[in-house]
Amino acid sequence: MRLFAAVLPPPAVIDELAAETAALRRLPGAERLRWTGHAGWHFTLAFYGEVADDLLPELHTRLARAAHRHGPFPLRVSGGGRFDHKVLWAGAAGGLDPMRHLADSAAAAARRAGVDMGEHRRYTPHLTLARSRGGEARVDLVPFSEALAEYESEEWSVTELALVRSNLPASGVPGEQPRYETVTSWPLGH
């Protein structure tokens, strides 16, 4: 199954961000972007890809240990940016150091459980809002990221580490979104 570890914003924060993105979707070029669904808004800590069923018990055990070693921390959705001309994202503020440490622990837990993690990249906390559609004329994402520059959600306390399953679209219908389901979660610091 295709898995990743994540921090999931609470519903009130998702609602705030939805209101902000509604304004972004009125900017020129927005109709040429593929916007992510609210149900898919999360901060990925570590992406695992396809994980064999026989590795799941050890992965669960190690993620539970990782969650136990990290306490709750404050977080808010803050600002935005882009990865080249391909991805528009909202950023994070608050407990970024604890979040990076949790991300490192989630990646290490998977490696120790036998999950092939590929090459290590520095963690950049982000929540994907939109992607460029392939093959079409490039959309300039600068106005979108600039519009997010001053955005700040309410602050919340991150209290869980979630293991999330990503179900990729299978119907072939253009614009179909992946579906995400929380497999399990562990309280931080317990």
Image (tube, rainbow, N blue to C red):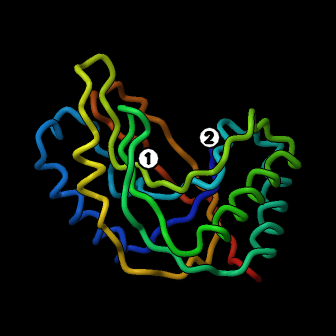
- Picture layout, residue 87 above or below residue 62: above
Separation (CA) of disc 2 from disc 1: 11 Å
- Residue at 30% x, 16% y is 135
- Residue at 65% x, 40% y is 1
Q: Badge 2, how many Cα within 10 Å: few under 14, some, many 20+?
A: some
Where is residue 163? Give x, y as percent.
64, 58
- Picture layout, residue 170 above or below residue 128: above
User: Among all residues in the image, which is located at the extreme top?
Assistant: 135
Residue type at mark 1: give it.
Arg
Q: Is residue 145 left or right of residue 65?
A: left
Task: Please say if the residues under marks 2 and 1 sit with CB atoms less than 8 Å apart.
Answer: no
Where is residue 43? Give x, y as percent.
52, 58
Determine which of the numbered discs, if any, sits on residue 2 in the image. 2
Q: Badge 1, how many Cα within 10 Å: few under 14, some, many 20+?
A: few
Mark 2, secondary structure of its residue: strand
Where is residue 50? Give x, y as percent.
67, 36
Determine which of the numbered discs, if any, sits on residue 31 in the image. none
The quarter holding residue 55 reads top right
- Residue at 28% x, 39% y is 141
Where is residue 11? Give x, y as percent.
38, 73
Quadrant where the image shows the C terminus = bottom right
Residue type at mark 2: give it.
Arg
Q: Is residue 95 left or right of residue 108?
A: left
- Residue at 66% x, 68% y is 97
Q: Of label 2 and label 1, which has the lower sequence position?
A: 2
The quarter holding residue 70 reads bottom right
Choose between 186 and 129: the one closer to the eye: 129
Mark 1, secondary structure of its residue: strand
Determine which of the numbered discs, if any, sits on residue 179 in the image. 1
How many numbered circles does the render carry? 2
